[in-house]
Image (cartoon, rainbow, N blue to C red):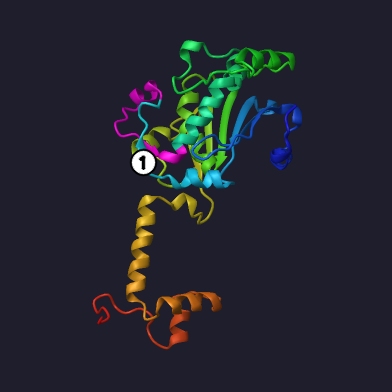
Amino acid sequence: MLSLRPFASSFQAAGVPDENVVYVSYANEALGSTPYFIILRPERRAVCMCIRGTASFADLVTDLVGRPVDFKDWLPSSFVEEHNIQDARAHAGILAAAKAVLRDLNRHQILHTLLTGRPKEESSVDQDGAEPHSGRRTPEDFQRLLAERGIDCRGWDLYVCGHSLGAAIASLLLPHFAEWAPGKVIAWAFNPPGGLITQEVAAALEPRSKDVGVTSVIVGKDIISRTSNITFEHLQDQIVVALARTRLSKLGWVKFRAFCPRYEEAHLNECFGASLFVILSKPRATC
């Protein structure tokens, strides 16, 4: 019996009855698996996989390991060849999380069984994929359970969605799903983090048709989608320059931020009666 409590509000908001919930994973580790669930939408003839965004300290650690790493060998060879990808790098932490989710999917193979009617052949499971079952239910067990529930989704479309960290994982997993899924394979990435993948891979994931692709949705001025190593370095440079130009001491900045509700430069100038920042061409004299 699945415990649906942590995702109950999501199911209720989406109008998903309990009988349409096929699989829920609560595993959450730093640089490892992220919670996700698989549900059915019979009215759309679709299977939906939803991946949770950053919501724990473990997720934060995953987000912060942002160095770019090569992942060309992890992508399906057909995807690399079709789009002639030469430079394939991704956010190291998010790539590790995507690999962990893919390993779990390859272990139980519920998604593959739902859409094709049978588990993958052992020889076709990715080398980075299935872990030893070690007493857990096998793909054949899940196939039998689905048959007992009368679930037949062969040929249905697959929709993968997520927010923030989950959006990034969904985007990275799409090429693997598109390799074998019989219907449409669409990913909806809500506020995905910036600096996720190199430009070549991003272009290859664009929805060139109505059947396969990733569509990103960025709401307003969401900071996560505008955050990357480059923007962090730019912010660092701006902070250093601002500290060098300001007429306030660091202690003065702390006091002002603590007691003044507004931080606009115009308001600062009103408070101090003179230009708060010196002109860059005329730096302050130092002793």
Front in this rendered view, residue 58 or 74: 58
Q: Is residue 89 magenta?
A: yes
The location of residue 21, given as percent across then percent down, is 70, 29
Q: Residue furthest bottom?
A: 273
Q: Quadrant of the N terminus?
A: top right
Front in this rendered view, residue 38 or 183: 38
Q: Is residue 111 magenta?
A: no
Instruction: Describe the element under mark 1 as helix, strand or loop.
Output: strand
Which amino acid type corresponds to the residue marked 1 in the rendered image?
Pro
The location of residue 283, given as percent across then percent down, is 26, 78
Q: Residue at x 32, y 30 (%)?
A: 85
Q: Residue at x 49, y 74 (%)?
A: 263
- Mark 1, Cα crowd under 10 Å, few <14 / some 14-19 / many 20+, is some
Note whether 241 is above or below 98 in the view shown.
below
Front in this rendered view, residue 281 or 65: 65
Q: Residue furthest front?
A: 134
Q: Residue at x 49, y 33 (%)?
A: 98
The location of residue 238, given as percent across then percent down, is 35, 65
Which residue is the site of mark 1?
Answer: 68
Note whether 251 is above or below 195 in the view shown.
below
The range drawn in magenta is: 76-94
Task: Decide if residue 12 is in sight here.
Answer: yes
